């Protein structure tokens, strides 16, 4: 291998190590999505795994279960959106535009 190729390989390995570290950090970081003024809260890891849901007793109306279902969905979407933003921020810091071109 010529010198330039060796440098490129070393740079790629360095970037790969940074990516692995960032992914490990994302697995340990959490964001919270909410809906209904905080009546429904969802905890999501930086890798978009849902790890918790809290529902305020005030949000539970036996005559309007559909509203609660909508609040849960909205909170999940909010949490996942925040997790994606966190992931893009971390992965973009590695020097990969758009957090790996949208692969994450």
Image (spheres, grey):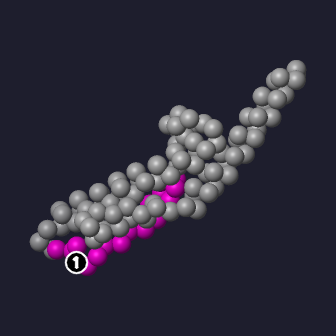
SS for dot 1: helix
Q: Residue at x 82, y 29 (%)?
A: 7
- The residue lying furthest to the top in this view is 2
Q: Residue at x 50, y 62 (%)?
A: 30
Q: Is residue 78 above or below residue 15?
A: below
Residue 84 on the magenta span: no
Numbered range of the magenta stretch: 45-61
**Where does the image place residue 48, in percent across and percent down from the top left?**
47, 54
Mark 1 lies on residue: 58
Write down the quadrant of residue 58 in the picture: bottom left
**Where does the image place residue 75, in percent across and percent down from the top left?**
32, 60
- Describe residue 60's horizontal placement relative to residue 49 as left or right: left
Along the viewing direction, whichever of 28 and 96 lies nearer the viewer: 96
- The residue lying furthest to the bottom in this view is 57
Q: Residues within 10 Å of mark 1 (few under 14, many from 20)?
A: few
Residue 46 on the magenta span: yes
**Where does the image place residue 3, in percent across and percent down from the top left?**
88, 23
- Describe residue 58's horizontal placement relative to residue 14 as left or right: left
């Amino acid at each position: 291998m010529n010198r330039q190729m060796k440098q490129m390989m070393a740079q790629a390995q360095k970037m790969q190590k940074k990516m692995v570290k960032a992914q490990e950090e994302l697995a340990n970081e959490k964001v919270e999505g909410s809906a209904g003024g905080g009546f429904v809260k969802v905890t999501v890891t930086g890798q978009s795994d849902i790890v918790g849901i809290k529902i305020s007793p005030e949000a539970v109306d036996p005559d309007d279960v559909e509203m609660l279902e909508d609040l849960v969905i909205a909170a999940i979407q909010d949490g996942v959106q925040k997790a994606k933003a966190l992931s893009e921020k971390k992965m973009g810091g590695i020097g990969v535009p758009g957090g790996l071109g949208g692969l994450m």
